[in-house]
Image (spheres, rainbow, N blue to C red):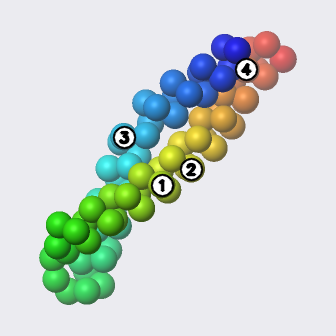
Amino acid sequence: MGFYIAVFVLALLLFFPVTKVIWVLSVRRTERRLGKKLSGEEANGQLARARFIALLLVSVFSWLFNLQLYSRLYG
């Protein structure tokens, strides 16, 4: 039970900063590619996309990190 709590807590702590980084990089790349500033609706679309990518990324990372940590501590 402690393993799953650790996975959830680490994923939760990483979710917001990782979302912000992915969103900023995505908006900058899109603005550079289009040559103009994104509208609010387009930026919100990029934010939804960034949240989805971050959710997958931090979930997998948290699972693998805690799996490695627990095997070293209790293995």
Residue denoted by label 2: 56
Q: Nearer the viewer, mark 4 or mark 3?
A: 3
Task: Please tell me in which quadrant of the rendered image residue 68 appears.
Answer: top right
Residue at screen point 52% across, 28% down: 10
Q: Nearer the viewer, mark 4 or mark 2?
A: 2
Which numbered disc flags the more N-terminal residue, 4 or 3? Answer: 3
Which numbered disc flags the more N-terminal residue, 1 or 4? Answer: 1
Distance between mark 1 and mark 4 Cα atoms: 27 Å
> Which numbered disc covers residue 70?
4
Distance between mark 2 and mark 3 Cα atoms: 13 Å
Residue at screen point 60% across, 35% down: 62
Residue denoted by label 3: 16
Distance between mark 4 and mark 2 Cα atoms: 21 Å
Q: Position of residue 2 (x, y in %)?
A: 66, 14
> Dot 4, how many residues are within 10 Å of its Cα: few (below 14), some (14-19), or many (20+)?
some
Which numbered disc flags the more N-terminal residue, 1 or 3? Answer: 3
Q: Position of residue 42 (x, y in %)?
A: 26, 71
Q: Do the numbered discs 4 and 3 sit on residues whose CB atoms are within 8 Å?
A: no
The secondary element bearing badge 4 is classed as helix
Front-most of 22 and 49? 49
Which numbered disc flags the more N-terminal residue, 4 or 2? Answer: 2
Residue at screen point 17% across, 66% down: 40
Q: Mark 3: which amino acid? A: Phe
Could you tell whether 1 is left or right of 12 in the image? right
Q: Is residue 23 visible?
A: no
Q: Mark 2: which amino acid? A: Leu
> Which numbered disc covers residue 60?
none
Residue denoted by label 1: 52
Q: Mark 1: which amino acid? A: Phe
Which numbered disc flags the more N-terminal residue, 2 or 3? Answer: 3
